[in-house]
Image (spheres, rainbow, N blue to C red):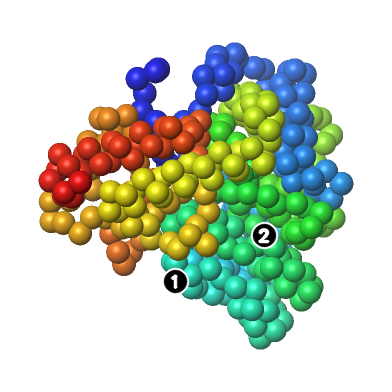
Amino acid sequence: MSNAPILLTPGPLTTSIRTRQAMLVDWGSWDRDFNQLTASVCEQLLAIIDGSASHHCVPLQGSGTFAVEAAIGTLVPRDGKVLVLINGAYGQRLAKICKVLGRTYSTFETAEDQPTTAADVDRLLAADPAITHVALIHCETSTGILNPLPEIAQVIKRHGKRLIIDAMSSFGALPIDAREIPFEALIAASGKCLEGVPGMGFVFTEKTALAAAEGNAHSLAMDLHDQHTYMAKTGQWRFTPPTHVVAALHEALQQYNEEGGLPARHQRYADNCKTLLDGMAAIGLRSFLPAEIQAPIIVTFHAPNDARYQFKEFYERVKAKGFILYPGKLTQVETFRVGCIGVVGADGMQAAVNAVADVLREMEVLDI
């Protein structure tokens, strides 16, 4: 296990031995102890956003995208309309979900290095009164760009519309306070900044909105209203839960709190990001985003402008030195991505930079 490479990806990511060990126990899905585990996880998740008074936490089997689809399908009425704000692949995916579900939607797309602004949203909502919901990717994992959530949320509230936040890559590391930022739903998953393993999404949904959502859902399995109602009544998941994933997340949350919660997790990731950016700049690799809109979650770098550079070979060579990177997801320029999250600190990030430098020397791509 100690020889396993470090995952410098936006999830799945490197987890602690304690988190992995939590998956060595088998749980009965209807067992009282497991039900208590689920309840504890939901309670701890709500505490991160100070949301217990206003929101329910509804867990769902599957990846984060399952939970995004469940939120759209459950909370947006069939005659609703969603404004999808896009500056990367995950905004595009959210729009595709609306299309597949038959929800009317419009899109507003900015360049991949350009945040959506509150002024953009103000103008768009004023121009189209049919819009009922606005969907925003908080941290767009395609590049690592951070969109200005607090400002956009206030504009949406002022227009009397409802906000759905995909916080997949930010939840647990970047502050979101349900008492200060009005939202109908916020969606995240187990295998990101909480440093659990993949397999469970969850949706924080406004209590009154969820109560009003009965009958909206397009799907039995993804009906958050039904899932919450059943869990509130029985303490159990409706269908077979990802028991080992829940146990791992419970253990990861214990460690999250021991580390110092969100402020400490944010600081470690920010330190990782700075180490990465400084180290890569020193060997001549440029980041795609300017610092002011770079979230400390994942960093996109321009690929070296050299015919001898091929991502596949670069990836395999860096992996052999103990680090797994991520391919770029941009359409216009060639890039690769390096995650700052997971059970890794600044020393590990510096070691990754050193590995990248060694590989580029070996490939005779950069004279460093």
Please say if the residues under marks 2 and 1 sit with CB atoms less than 8 Å apart: no
Give the distance between the C-alpha atoms of the residues marked 2 and 1, in whole angstroms.
21 Å
**Sequence-earlier tag: 2 or 1:** 1
- In front of the other: 48 or 134: 48
Q: Residue at x 74, y 46 (%)?
A: 49
Q: Is label 2 or label 1 in front?
A: 1
| Amino acid type assigned to the residue bearing label 2 in the image | Ile
Answer few, some or many: residues within 10 Å of disc 1's Cα (few below 14, many 20 plus, some between 14 and 19). few
Tag of residue 111 = 1
State the count of labels. Answer: 2
Asked where in the image residue 152 lies, by quadrant, the reply is bottom right
Q: Is residue 141 left or right of residue 117?
A: left
Which quadrant: the N terminus? top left
Is label 2 in a helix, a strand or a loop?
Answer: strand
Q: Is residue 204 left or right of residue 194?
A: right
Q: Residue at x 43, y 32 (%)?
A: 347
Asked where in the image residue 94 lies, by quadrant, the reply is bottom right
Q: Residue furthest top?
A: 25
Q: Is residue 329 above or below residue 353?
A: below
For label 2, the residue is 164
Tag of residue 20 = none
**Where in the figure is residue 350, as x and y percent of width and height?**
38, 37
Residue 128 visible in the current orientation: no
Is label 1 in a helix, a strand or a loop?
Answer: loop
**Where in the figure is residue 263, as x and y percent of width and height?**
67, 41
